[in-house]
């Protein structure tokens, strides 16, 4: 795999990044909360990640594929500071309180009920740190009949109905990425930005709460409406589209090609310029998207009979000429070497405890801003430095280590 140079990307001074001066303290693990805080760190926020002294964020041990480190952890934790604290010890809680007194944002995705038991819920924090913006990330929310349930990504995909929509007809499938966690992390990130803006412009502090179930539920909007106001929920159709035809993979003489028709104009263009059959465009079986969906298998087979006669390169060229959206059925390796990423200079490099890795620029490009790409921290790498900032002497830090508080 080629490592693309980041030469030519002028680093933005850290003190001029959009979130410079913002401090985030996060008791986080796994995916949702770390994804939210990493995006804050990308834009210059100082993120102090609290980890358990014994093992830290359990996502550190999901796998060992990236220079001996977890692929999840390397993805989610660059540009952060790792501080180890035993939050069951009085001294550990005292250190956390001192950190929170200096912070702008507090993020946590503790187990159900744990934040309230530790007086780290939004109401409790408001009494002690009125300027602090708390962000709670949970499975099903902090209230309601399911508030005490654990919620992992696969379970939330099941409860929202996403698995019932995904995969081939005979095999309900979860998505290949942690989509519920990612959705929750995105809404936590945008919620925190909104709360910071509100505090800056009005002085009002708003708590942020995000539930994985509700975050992914928002992404289920289209099939939810289709189901509620139609007779049935959308069919499970693999890589095809449940409500648009043709849309999905089609065979070629040497592989497969993805194509997507969005409207009647494109259908006519496909029939006349690619399939070579103008009459097909007005065939009463297929003349509208609704009729094509009703006869999905028949329509797709008519198209496939023609696409099988062309090589992948020939079909892609003809689809381009006809202005029909298309793509390859690529692998992850194809994505890593995609010409669009290289051509737009989207790769940067990040140090990790095991070695240098590639990392993609955040999707939202801000003109004149080069996001941070500081190292992924080793477990507890910043503990001593942060304790020193808080006024602890070397002897006091040694005592805390001896007691396994840090």
Image (spheres, grey):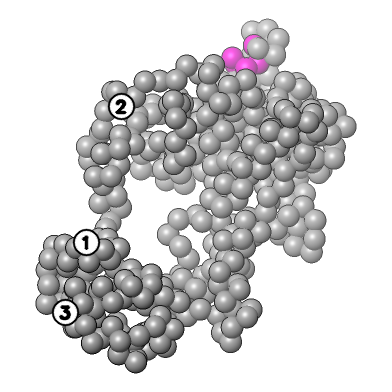
* Residue nearer the viewer, 348 or 242: 242
Q: Is residue 236 left or right of residue 320?
A: right
From the viewer's perspective, is residue 352 above or below residue 102?
below
Disc sitting over residue 6 in the figure: 2
Could one spot residue 312 in this view of the protein?
no
Quote the CA–CA distance across marks 1 and 3.
Answer: 15 Å
Q: Toward which corner of the image does residue 22 lie, by quadrant?
A: top right
- From the image, state whether disc 3 or disc 2 is nearer to you: 3
Looking at the image, tell me whether mark 2 or mark 1 is earlier in sequence order.
Answer: 2
Q: Residue furthest right?
A: 127
- From the image, state whether disc 2 or disc 1 is nearer to you: 1
- What secondary structure is marked by label 1? helix
Quote the CA–CA distance across marks 3 and 2.
Answer: 46 Å
- Looking at the image, do the residues carrying marks 3 and 2 touch, with CB atoms under 8 Å apart? no
- Looking at the image, do the residues carrying marks 1 and 3 touch, with CB atoms under 8 Å apart? no
Residue holding disc 1: 320
The magenta stretch spans which residues?
A: 384-388
């Amino acid at each position: 795999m080629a490592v693309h140079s980041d030469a030519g990307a002028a680093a933005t001074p850290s003190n001029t990044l959009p979130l410079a001066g913002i401090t985030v303290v996060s008791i986080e693990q796994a995916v949702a909360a770390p994804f939210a805080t990493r995006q804050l760190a990308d834009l210059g926020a100082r993120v102090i990640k609290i980890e358990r002294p014994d093992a830290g964020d359990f996502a550190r041990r999901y796998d060992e594929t990236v220079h001996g480190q977890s692929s999840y952890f390397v993805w989610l934790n660059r540009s952060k500071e790792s501080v180890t604290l035993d939050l069951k010890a009085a001294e550990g809680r005292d250190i956390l309180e001192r950190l929170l007194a200096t912070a702008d944002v507090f993020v946590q995705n503790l187990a159900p009920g744990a934040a309230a038991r530790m007086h780290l819920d939004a109401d409790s924090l408001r009494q002690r740190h009125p300027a602090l913006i708390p962000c709670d990330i949970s499975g099903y929310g902090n209230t309601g009949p399911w508030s005490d349930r654990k919620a992992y990504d696969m379970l939330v995909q099941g409860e929202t109905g996403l698995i019932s929509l995904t995969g081939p007809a005979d095999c309900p499938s979860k998505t290949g990425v942690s989509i519920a966690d990612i959705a929750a992390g995105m809404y936590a990130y945008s919620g925190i930005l909104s709360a910071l803006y509100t505090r800056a412009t009005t002085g009002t502090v708003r708590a942020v709460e995000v539930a994985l179930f509700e975050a992914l539920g928002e992404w289920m909007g289209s099939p939810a409406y289709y189901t509620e106001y139609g007779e049935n929920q959308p069919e499970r159709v693999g890589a095809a589209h449940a409500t648009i035809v043709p849309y999905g993979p089609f065979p070629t003489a040497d592989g497969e090609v993805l194509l997507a028709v969005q409207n009647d104009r494109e259908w006519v263009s496909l029939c006349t310029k690619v399939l070579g059959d103008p009459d097909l465009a007005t065939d009463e079986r297929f003349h509208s998207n609704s009729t094509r969906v009703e006869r999905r298998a028949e329509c797709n087979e008519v198209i496939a009979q023609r696409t099988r006669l062309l090589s992948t390169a020939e079909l892609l060229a003809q689809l381009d000429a006809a202005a029909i959206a298309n793509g390859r059925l690529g692998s992850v390796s194809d994505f890593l070497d995609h010409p669009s990423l290289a051509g737009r200079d989207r790769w940067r490099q990040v140090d990790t405890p095991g070695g240098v890795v590639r990392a993609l620029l955040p999707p939202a490009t801000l003109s004149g801003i080069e996001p941070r790409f500081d190292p992924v921290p080793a477990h507890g790498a910043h503990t001593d430095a942060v304790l020193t900032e808080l006024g602890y002497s070397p002897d006091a830090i040694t005592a805390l280590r001896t007691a396994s508080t840090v």
